[in-house]
Image (tube, grey):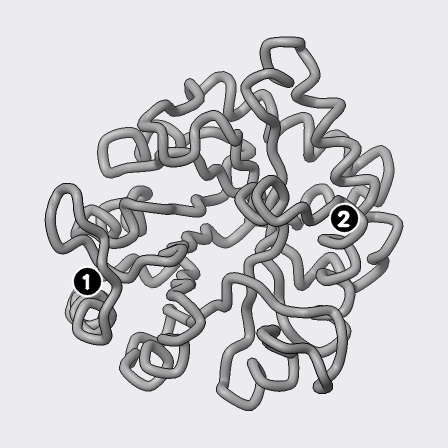
Amino acid sequence: MARKFFVGGNFKRRAGLTTATSRNGTKESIKSIVKGLNEANLDSNVEVVIAPPSLYLQLAQDSLNKSNVEVSAQNVFDKPNGAFTGEISVEQLKDSGIHWTILGHSERRTLLGESDAVVASKTKFAIDGGISVVWCCGESLEQREKGDTVSVIEGQLAALAAKVSGDDWKKIVIAYEPIWAIGTGKVATVEQAQEVHAAIRKWLRANVSETVADETRILYGGSVNGKNCKDLAKEQDIDGFLVGGASLKPEFIDIINSNL
């Protein structure tokens, strides 16, 4: 079956570029980004999610009027509502009309110490609660230089597969984000990206099922921009993008429309 192209915009802890060097998120910048999406001619065959900082989730949700654009959280906790200071629950997201979350981003894995097991647990809890997940994986520069890229990602996938099964996979979009290319301006070559995407699909086929391998969308994320998106989008196993800084700029529209 044909996999529907998917583009996610991860605003991280910023909500708009005010100058070349200042990234100060404000309600007005969120409104401006959403207004741009509402008014743009977007490819109707692309599924789009935007992930603003948690403080602005409801604002973005209430401001959007594009049928193929949804709002995503950047994280969610793997426990129900309770005494968990600072965390956001699945129930709270659903109550706000939010049906997506990003999980396992390298910044949370490296800066906040989230292990493969923790990310897998969060993923399972989110799915069981009715939230779809953009599940991130990727290798560091040191791991790539050692030739460990595929083995690192296979380890991350194995932890996920130990927690999820069956129809759970229908609620997962995989995002391959080489850590060394996130926010650095560096980007994997088209060949490097396709090679890893193909390895992920091969692993799914061997360790999960033919159906999951064929149907799961695998995104590329790592300094994606308006200049490189069209070449990346042509690859057989690249089903879209998870976009960082460029999702705050007008070129995000070009990335969404990269198949046109």
Q: Is residue 2 left or right of residue 259?
A: right
What residue appears at the point 55 percent right and 68 percent down from the top-left corner?
A: 100
Q: Is residue 162 left or right of residue 174?
A: right
Q: Which residue is mark 2?
A: 211
Q: CA distance from mark 2 to mark 1?
A: 33 Å
Q: Nearer the viewer, residue 235 or 149?
A: 149
Label 2: how many residues lie within 10 Å, few (<14), some (14-19) or many (20+)? few
Q: Which residue is mark 1?
A: 41
Q: Is residue 39 visible?
A: yes
Residue 138 location (% of width, % of height): 60, 33
Residue 231 location (% of width, % of height): 34, 27
Q: Nearer the viewer, residue 256 or 101?
A: 101
Q: Nearer the viewer, residue 237 or 251?
A: 251
Q: Is residue 19 left or right of residue 61?
A: left
Residue 140 location (% of width, % of height): 58, 25
**Amino acid type for the residue under numbered disc 1:** Asn
What residue appears at the point 55 percent right and 58 percent down from the top-left corner?
A: 102
Q: Is residue 233 visible?
A: no
What residue appears at the point 38 percent right and 69 percent down from the top-left corner?
A: 68
For numbered disc 2, what is the local secondary structure? helix
Q: Quadrant of the C terminus?
A: top left
What is the tally of numbered marks visible in this picture?
Answer: 2
**Residue furthest top as drawn:** 146
What residue appears at the point 75 percent right and 82 percent down from the top-left corner?
A: 80
Residue 233 location (% of width, % of height): 40, 35
For numbered disc 1, what is the local secondary structure? loop
**Amino acid type for the residue under numbered disc 2:** Thr
Vertical comparison of 174 with 145: above or below: below
